[in-house]
């Protein structure tokens, strides 16, 4: 794949990850749930990024981009849900 395309995907995926991590406390009731939610997203994101980067073992820059895309992709559903909750002015759950 083209490095520019992967870079754009990495930026979008990381933006979703940052958004999700910043919005989790706004919609999560307790500190323990905040920590658990963040930890699950980060651990699964790291695992996904590792698997994604394995295909680029001989190209370190592309492997890094693949890792970032894999990490961020895990956060996209959470970011979307939190975006909808914010639009609806939902409370903490």
Image (spheres, rainbow, N blue to C red):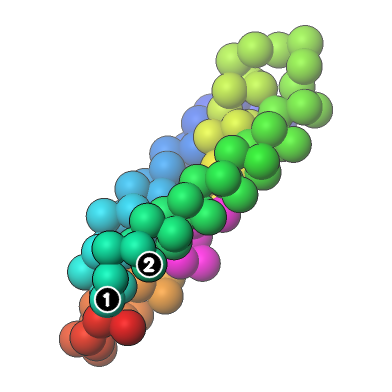
Q: Residue furthest front?
A: 32
Q: Residue at x 26, y 55 (%)?
A: 22
Residue 20 vertical position relative to residue 82 in the rendered view, above or below: above
> Mark 2 sits on what residue?
33
> Magenta segment, principal secondary structure?
helix
**Marker disc for residue 6:** none
Position of residue 81 in the picture relative to residue 90 (left or right): right
Query: Which quadrant holds residue 14?
Result: top left
Q: Is residue 12 magenta?
A: no
The percent coordinates of residue 24 (x first, y second) are 31, 64
Residue 29 vertical position relative to residue 54 in the rendered view, above or below: below
Question: Which residues are drawn in magenta?
Answer: 74-79
The answer to whether marks 2 and 1 mark residues whose Cβ atoms lie closer than 8 Å is yes
Within 10 angstroms of label 2, few (less than 14), some, or many (20 or more) residues? some
Position of residue 61 in the picture relative to residue 90 (left or right): right
The percent coordinates of residue 32 (x first, y second) are 35, 63
Q: Residue at x 44, y 59 (%)?
A: 36
> Mark 1 sits on what residue?
29
The percent coordinates of residue 15 (x first, y second) are 36, 47
């Amino acid at each position: 794949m083209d490095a520019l395309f992967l870079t754009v995907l990495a930026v979008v995926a990381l933006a979703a990850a940052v958004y999700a991590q910043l919005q989790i406390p706004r919609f999560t009731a307790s500190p323990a749930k905040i920590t658990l939610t963040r930890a699950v997203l980060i651990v699964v994101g790291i695992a996904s990024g590792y698997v994604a980067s394995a295909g680029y073992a001989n190209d370190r820059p592309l492997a890094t981009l693949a890792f970032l895309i894999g990490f961020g992709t895990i956060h996209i559903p959470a970011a979307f849900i939190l975006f909808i909750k914010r639009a609806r002015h939902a409370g903490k759950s």
